[in-house]
Image (cartoon, grey):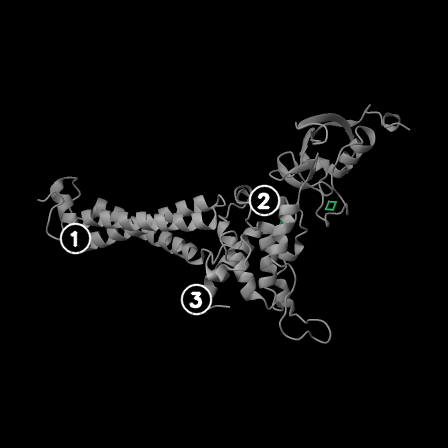
Amino acid sequence: MSITDTKPQLKGQNVATVNIFRYDPSTTDEAHYDSWQVPITGSMTVLDLLFYILEHEDGSLAFRYACREAICGSCALYVNGTYRLACKTQLKDLKATEINISPLPHLKVIKDLVVDMDPFWEKYERIRPYLITRDDLPEKEFLQDPADRLKMDDMVDCILCGACYSSCPQCWTDPEYLGPAALVKMNRFTVDTRDQANQERTKIFDNEHGVWRCHTIFNCVEACPKDINQTYSIQHLKRRAVARRFGGK
Amino acid sequence: MSVRDQGQPAWLVGPGGAMAWLLQRLSGFILIILLATHLLLLHYGGDQQLVFASVTIRLKTLLFIIIDTGLLALGLYHGLNGLRNVVLDYDLSRRAGSVLTTVLWIVGIFMTIYGATALYSFWAGRGVFGG
Ligand code: SF4
Ligand code: FES
């Protein structure tokens, strides 16, 4: 069955004009936008819309997704001028009949809506995003006070979608800057009472490519689909770095 | 590369700017107070005419000289450190970063001394123009 055979009729339906960024380095050096008319149903998400186009209009459209429930962080896109998770964003919330979909800005495009996330993951690795302990491991699990667990409540919600990294002007100008997501994770481990690597961690964030590059622009806070306050975490790390200079831990 | 940095990856340029960050905030806070005092003194303190004689009197007042020296030094620190931050945003090499910091310190110290000579000349009993 060809693609057009299954295409639903648009008659009597709400229709949106969808413009999608296209780029295929194997055929051309030029990027462009393709436009389609797509029938809209009540709870349709941006991801559903991409599937509609993939199934009925152009089977070569490339985009990322995995969980479809706002937890894997694969589907972050730039939709009508804001950072969005495609799977979490319902079209009716966009309140627009024209929908423009682009890949995450300021990252290298691999194809269409798929960007190269390598720099993002490289920074993430640099901060050693795992628990480091020096003492002998406990017999059973690590116990933690609920009050201490609460301190990292905001930071553990990060799904590593990269929206904040893509939105941060410091990441655009300094390719070595750790970026908001990695610093949020760094803060998550520095406030973790079980972690014992504060000294090594400070070296990594108290660094000209670390927290000091953040000028509290708040783009990351605005971009985050999980409403994480990255700037708070970064400022917290700055205060920690200063405290260490005066003998704090 | 210093001994301390050996074995560290190139991106780890440190130790970072904790003190510069703290001093930027402190100087900013003190500048607000000094600036307000400076303006109040200019508008409400003593003879407010903008003539040579009244300016001379002002520049012989120790409080005014202290406030203005503070404004000069902290204003320069705050401004030049701000400039340093802007330039560092563009991924300078470690070496270029240190050269920049050194040059800005030299410029700042020179300008503070240069500005202070004008502020202190009446206090020292000599006019700026030898009068
Ligand atoms: S902090 Fe928010 S925007 Fe940044 S990667 Fe995590 S979930 Fe995405
Ligand atoms: S598909 Fe996993 S977050 Fe959207």
Q: In the visual, does A27 lie left or right of B33?
A: right
Q: Is residue B73 visible?
A: yes
Does residue A110 sit above or below B40 in this rendering? above
Do circles 3 and 2 both sit on a common chain? yes
Numbered badge on residue A246? 3
Does residue B3 sit above or below B124 in this rendering? below
Which residue is under mark 1? B61
Does residue B32 sit above or below A138 in this rendering? above
x and y percent of residue B28 in the render? 37, 51
Which residue occupies the foreground of this view, A129 or B28? A129
Element type at mark 1: loop
Label 1 crowd bin: few (<14), some (14–19), many (20+), radius 10 Å: few
Residue at the image point whose x is 72% and y is 31% from the top: A26
Pinpoint the chain carrying mark 1: B
Q: Is residue B36 visible?
A: no
x and y percent of residue B30 in the render? 34, 54
Q: Amino acid at mark 2?
A: Glu
Do circles 2 and 1 both sit on a common chain? no
Q: Amino acid at mark 1?
A: Thr
Evaluate if marks 3 and 1 touch, with contact meaning CB atoms under 8 Å apart: no
Q: Which quadrant does the N terminus of chain A fall into? A: top right
Do circles 3 and 1 both sit on a common chain? no
User: Depth-wise, is mark 3 or mark 1 nearer the camera?
Assistant: 3
- Residue farthest left in this picture: B131
Q: Amino acid at mark 3?
A: Phe
User: Depth-wise, is mark 3 or mark 2 nearer the camera?
Assistant: 3
Label 2 crowd bin: few (<14), some (14–19), many (20+), radius 10 Å: some
Element type at mark 3: loop
Which residue is under mark 2? A222
Which residue occupies the foreground of this view, A3 or A120? A120
Of the image marks 3 and 2, the number of the one nearer the N terminus? 2
